[in-house]
Image: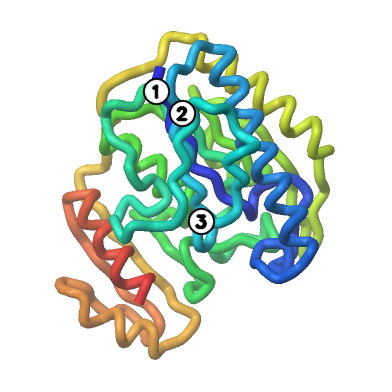
Amino acid sequence: MKIYISADIEGTADIFTWEEAVPGSEEYKKACRQMTAEVAAACAGANKAGAAEIWVHDAHLHGKNIAHESLPDNTVLVRGFSGHPYGMLQELNDSFDAVILLGCHSEAGSGANPLSHTITRRIHRLRINGTPASEMMLSMYTTAYLGVPVVLVSGDQAVCDVCREISPQTATVATKSGHGDSVICSHPDRVCRLIADETEAVLKKNLPRGQRELPGEFRVEVEFKDHGAAYRASFYPDIETSAPTTVVYKTKEFFEVLRMLHFVLKA
């Protein structure tokens, strides 16, 4: 089996402040150790299930968070972002048998995680066909587009709940739940143990193949926190302005959604 793991940090066990999520403090170093431990746990479970090759994308911030030496020697680590619209799933293609999403967090505008956001902290909300969209949801659409199943998602309780709604066959491991500016956390060692056990269990099953059905049309609504950012985004081809802080983009092709978000949100 060839497995792809995309890992973020805001949904890992225990962390709940931006000081823990960005470089420059001992708290950040501790968060990186936990992020690495959760990835290592998934790798261990995958290897127990018979994985031959594991690709890991260090998909938080600048991609300099995971200690490769702490992972098994059959891992390939992708650090940083090439600029491809797949973003957190850079290098994913249909040669992979399964995808695992670790450290996921709730979407921009959600109160379910003090670190909730979608791609950037510059937006208040991103909606796809009327539904608030998280990075996890975008990854789910991307894997469906490529025909590779997501077998496990870990992260805050709310993002795990959404995952089960849109993909009931996907296993989940909740690391914490958010309440205002606080989080209620499972023990980090327990989280790692559950990730390892769930990864092994799901990969021993018959993995589904083939492209999942995607919507026939995508209506993407991006609500920025600042009207100037929305004005700048309004110059992307075929985007319309629906309010001073909001732009809307419509397309029948999911890759065009990713292309638009890549250029509009990374500007």
Q: Hey, what amino acid is under mark 2? A: Ile
> Number of marks in the image?
3
Question: Residue 234: where, in percent of width, then height?
Answer: 26, 81
Residue 63 bears which disc, if any? 3
> Residues under labels 2 and 3: Cα distance?
17 Å
Crowd rating for badge 1 (residues with CA inside 10 Å; few <14, some 14–19, many 20+): some
Q: Hey, what amino acid is under mark 1? A: Lys
Question: Residue 39: where, in percent of width, then height?
Answer: 61, 36
Question: Residue 89: where, in percent of width, then height?
Answer: 39, 45
Residue placed most toward the observer, 41 or 18: 41
Crowd rating for badge 2 (residues with CA inside 10 Å; few <14, some 14–19, many 20+): many
Residue placed most toward the observer, 120 or 134: 120
Residue name at image x 44 percent, y 46 percent: 78
Q: Which residue is mark 1?
A: 2
Residue placed most toward the observer, 231 or 55: 55
Q: Which residue is mark 2?
A: 54
Residue placed most toward the observer, 127 or 40: 40
